[in-house]
Amino acid sequence: MPVKRSDDVIVETNMLSEPYLKTASTLARVAREMADQTIADRLRALAEHYERQADRASVMDSAGASGRPSVAAKAG
């Protein structure tokens, strides 16, 4: 997995976000190949949703790796 350095902390990126990105990519590809424009638009919207989920998961990955409690942990 890709690794980035941040303030002497090594963070493995995409631990949680990788499945979301793969799903988003698949949905976007299927939307491009779709003949029905209504369904294609819905698939694109769903792909964008998964991309946002990947961003959130990436933030959670970074927060967990740096020792900071996540928002979910604070709420619990």
Image: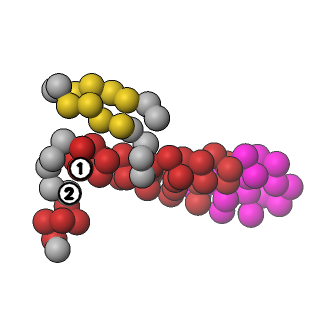
- Judge depth for marks 2 and 1 and give the one in front: 1
The residues colored magenta run 29-45
Distance from the alpha carbon under mark 2 to that under mark 1 = 7 Å
Judge from the rendering whether residue 67 lies leftward or rightward of residue 42; answer left or right: left
Tell me the amino acid under the disc marked 1: Gly
Which residue is nearer to you in this view: 28 or 8? Answer: 8
Q: Looking at the rendered structure, which numbered label has been put on residue 64?
A: 1
Q: Is residue 55 visible?
A: no
Q: According to the image, label 2 marks what residue?
A: 70
Q: Looking at the rendered structure, which numbered label has been put on residue 31?
A: none
Q: Position of residue 67 (x, y in %)?
A: 15, 47
Labelled pair 2, 1 in contact (Cβ < 8 Å): yes
Which residue is rendered at x = 37% and y = 52% of the image? 57
| Figure quadrant of the C terminus | bottom left
Which residue is nearer to you in this view: 11 or 54? Answer: 11
Sequence-first disc among 2 and 1: 1
Which residue is rendered at x = 50% and y = 47% of the image? 18
Q: Position of residue 25 (x, y in %)?
A: 63, 46
